[in-house]
Image: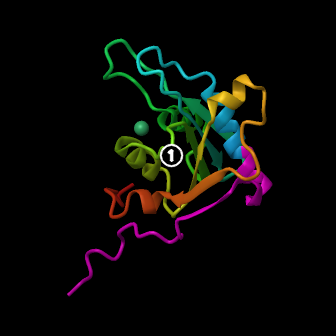
Amino acid sequence: MTDLTKNFARPEKTEVVVTFGSLDLSVQELLTAAFQVRQRAYVPYSGFKVGAAFRAKSGGQIFSGCNVENAAFTPSSCAERTAIAKAVSEGATEFSAGAVIAYEPEVFTTPCGVCRQFIREFANEDIPIYIAQSIDARISAKEEPLQKEDPILCTSIYNLLPSSFHTYRK
Ligand SMILES: [Zn+2]
């Protein structure tokens, strides 16, 4: 019998927590871009700021985005979708890595279900997704936003959304 599950998205990367300082400079740059754009988050209702950044596979350009809330709530956009919509609008539809940064004490903030599917649309392979915490107190103290010993969750889109919906028709 044909294996109807053989094309399912299965994690190809191991999910690990490492320190910021141990990451390649290109990844540090991606996380820093997500940190910077987080400052522009439009969140008058929740106050929960998120920044995201994706690196285009071709050319390596970084596209970043923040979350944008709306008084009617439903039209709100998450940071990940803002970043990817900006990239697609400018011709980039394939990415080599993504980064997401927000802040909740004691936990990493991972993309919501809608964003996982949105990222998956543009990930035909298991791209790494780096998750960091942004400590707002450091910003007001004018400290480095991301420090060498900060924990970073290195996951991937297939870890976040295995067996995802995907059409193979083009
Ligand atoms: Zn989302």
**In magenta stretch: residue 4:** yes
Q: Is residue 134 above or below residue 131?
A: above
Establish if 75 lies above or below 118.
above
Q: How many marks?
A: 1
> In the image, what residue type sits under mark 1?
Glu
Q: Is residue 169 visible?
A: yes
Query: Which stretch appears magenta?
Result: 1-29
Residue labelled with disc 1: 106
| Colouring convention used in this rendered image of the protein | rainbow
Q: Residue at position x 72%, y 36% from top?
A: 145
- Which quarter of the frame holds ligand 1? top left
* 155 lies left or right of 159: right
Q: Is residue 117 magenta?
A: no
Residue depicted at 51% across the width and 59% down the height: 156
The residue sitting at 61% across, 21% down in the picture is 40
Foreground of the two, 99 or 107? 107
Residue 9 spot, x, y in % from top left = 39, 66
Residue 59 at least partly seen = no
Residue 16 position in % (x across, y down): 56, 65
The N terminus - image quarter: bottom left
Residue 74 appears in which quarter of the rendering?
Answer: top left
Identify the image quadrant of residue 11: bottom left
Horizontal arrangement in the rendering, residue 5 relative to residue 139 (left or right): left
Q: Residue furthest left?
A: 1
Image quarter of residue 29: top right
105 vs 25, left or right, is left
Residue 24 in the image: x percent, y percent? Answer: 76, 58
